[in-house]
Amino acid sequence: MTTDPAPGADLQQLVANARAGRVRAIARLISLVENNSPRLREAMSLMAPHTGHAHVVGLTGSPGVGKSTTVAALIAAFRRRGVRIGVLAVDPSSPFTGGAVLGDRVRMQNHSLDTGVYIRSMASRGHLGGLSTAAPQALRVFDTARFDVVLVETVGVGQSEVEIASTADTTLVLLAPGMGDGIQVAKAGILEIGDVFVINKADRDGVQNLQREIRGMIALDPQRGPQEWKPPIVRTVASAGEGIAELADQIEAHRAAQRLSGAWDRRRLARFRAEIEALALAEVRRRFLTGDRAVAADLAARVRDGRTDPFSAADLLLRNL
Ligand code: GDP
């Protein structure tokens, strides 16, 4: 595991090396994020001018649907197009699972000598602001390192998938026939976040039914007006590389359409706003928990004695932070 750079190590040099595509520098910068290093702030401020270029593509779907296989296939497809591609596998629960598996799978494809590919798994447990701030910061490192496309894969299920998808410019929702996915789509709120639906394992029975279900749900979604991007449904057999070129086409088409309509920028602004809020709230909480406990105790006593009301006490507390 990579650690923080030694004290005195030049962050500026580290950022410059990441800009030059040096893997060690990229790895170290992401470790700063992962470890919530005290030097993260400085690093982020050095990287800020170099960000805004990468197309962030989120990938979500139930375990076993074929996410890792699809990521590996997409890497190959994008590399054939000369696109530099990064992969961030975020595991909200454990630092040691999916990313490693994914890494192995891609290493089997002989990308390890290719500087146009970088794969990294990241744990986000205990990070300031949680998943919602750790992933975007890691993505800034990829962006700084001039990756054109960054795939974000979540390992595990639940709310975090939706959270991660909200950090993406384009969200792929993977489904497979025979997994009861139609129902899952409706339940998990995954329909709203899908920009491109992928029916993987299209070599299996039930593709038509699943496609009909997804189409029906897209048509019913009240949030999708006639001018909005209409999510395409792409059939893939990721394990055989089938349909992957079309998937890459649709990812690029979504970017082009969003840029044209202005939705691209609106979505990014909403994202950064949410990120700033999450950081600010986490900081308030941190200061509250590490600050002078006597202030809070004194305020509590005043509320108890009827000398002040809780709203005024909260105001005072905020002013004292
Ligand atoms: P993940 O858990 O979503 O990352 O799923 P994996 O990529 O690990 O895939 C789960 C299993 O499905 C693996 O055994 C893959 O080889 C297999 N698989 C992936 N894509 C396809 C496909 O298109 N068709 C079939 N039949 N199997 C697939």
Image (tube, rainbow, N blue to C red):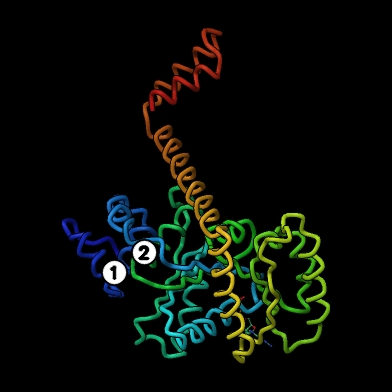
Three-letter residue code for mark 1: Ala
Q: Mark 1 packing: few (<14 Cα in 10 Å), some, or many (20+)? A: many
Residue on which the image places disc 1: 18
Three-letter residue code for mark 2: Val
| Camera-nearest residue between 66 and 289 | 66
Left or right position of 157 against 114: right
Q: The C terminus is located in which quarter?
A: top left
Residue on which the image places disc 2: 141
- Residue at x 39%, y 34% (from the top left corner): 287
Q: The N terminus is located in which quarter?
A: bottom left
- Residue at x 49%, y 45% (from the top left corner): 278
**Residue 105 to residue 149: above or below:** below
Which comes before the other along the chain, label 1 or label 2?
Answer: 1
Q: Check contact, mark 1 vs mark 2: CB within 8 A.
A: yes
SS for tag 2?
helix
Q: Quadrant of ligand 1?
A: bottom right
Q: Is mark 1 within 8 Å of ligand 1?
A: no
